[in-house]
Amino acid sequence: MNLRDLKYLVALADHKHFGRAAAACFVSQPTLSTQIKKLEDELGVPLVERAPRKVMLTPAGREAAGRARGIIAEVEQMKEAARRSQDPEAGTVRLGIFPTLGPYLLPHVVPHIRQRFPQLELLLVEEKSDQLLVQLREGRLDAAILALPLQDDQLHSEFLFEEPFVLAVPEGHALAGHSSLTLADLSEQRLLLLQDGHCLREQALDVCHLSGALEKAEFQATSLETLRQMVAANVGVTLLPLLAVKPPVARSENIRLIGFRADKQPSRRIAMVWRRSSAMGSFLEQLAEQFKHLPASLLSVDAAIEPPEAVAA
């Protein structure tokens, strides 16, 4: 048994297809198939159910693939630790981030990271939060930017910042004339939300539960931009995270953004998360510092919204 064979098994678990797994490993299909068979012979159990059009792992195969992921991750961490012992600020970091934050946060942070760590190769992966957690636990990511809270004793969470929400309403809406809101103002509203799987959906639902608002359940968006367009088309109202309405994001026409009173401000808490066992922990703390040093105006609601009189003018 060697590391190469374990990588073949993990690729087969990921792709469920010998040809695609072989292509991902840059080997021929017969080579991968032969090595998987040798691994089965060595372990003494079948790892794969081979069907004409479908490949499935046996229970033993699934367990072996899970253990193989852990071994591969540990070896990669060993290599990374050795590289960083020579140059702590060089090497590669695989960083995950979720879609309702990544496009809006990264332009403000990545240039500073490149300036601070010129030798660092930052590989960014955008996925929904549940997928990021899976990849982080399996060692396919070194760290991830996620919303708190997280319930996992194996992960370290480094708080970065708190991002407020603003309410987006069409021009002419009953709330458009308000200069600020309380949660009680949402009690009669039906909010447009993202579809299942987005952490922003869960965060918005929490606000709905606190305020007595309801979801406009007949429509669920796939992205923040879809939500924004639906509001502009007078389909409904929605909550938007503050960074999603800050430059370089263009201001949307026909939409009024309204903040909440400071003592009633809904928000989400953002953290960088990594495995407590990671050999990169000390460097990831330095990297997290770059995400903490955002300009104060970037998280200021007042700088994102126009007063009602400005809109009317």
Image (spheres, rainbow, N blue to C red):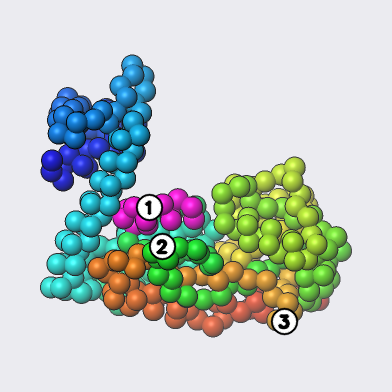
Report whether 187 appears left or right of 59: right
**What residue span does the magenta drawing correspond to?**
129-141
How many numbered callouts?
Answer: 3
Residue 34 image-quadrant placement: top left
Quickly name the residue at label 3: 263
Tell me the element at label 3. Answer: helix
Residue linked to disc 1: 135
Say whether residue 281 is visible: yes
As measured in the structure, the alpha-carbon distance from the residue carrying label 3 to the one carrying label 2 is: 30 Å
* Above/below status of 54 relative to 211: above
- Name the kind of residue labelled 1 in the image: Gln
Most common secondary structure along the magenta stretch: helix
- Mark 2 and mark 1 lie on one chain; the one further toward the N terminus is 1
Instruction: Answer above or below: position of 69 versus 177.
Output: above
Q: Is residue 133 magenta?
A: yes
How far across and down, in percent of the image, does residue 65 sit? Answer: 29, 41
First in sequence, mark 3 or 2: give its number: 2
Q: Answer few, some or many: residues within 10 Å of disc 1's Cα (few below 14, many 20 plus, some between 14 and 19).
A: some
- For this orientation, the residue located farthest to the front is 44
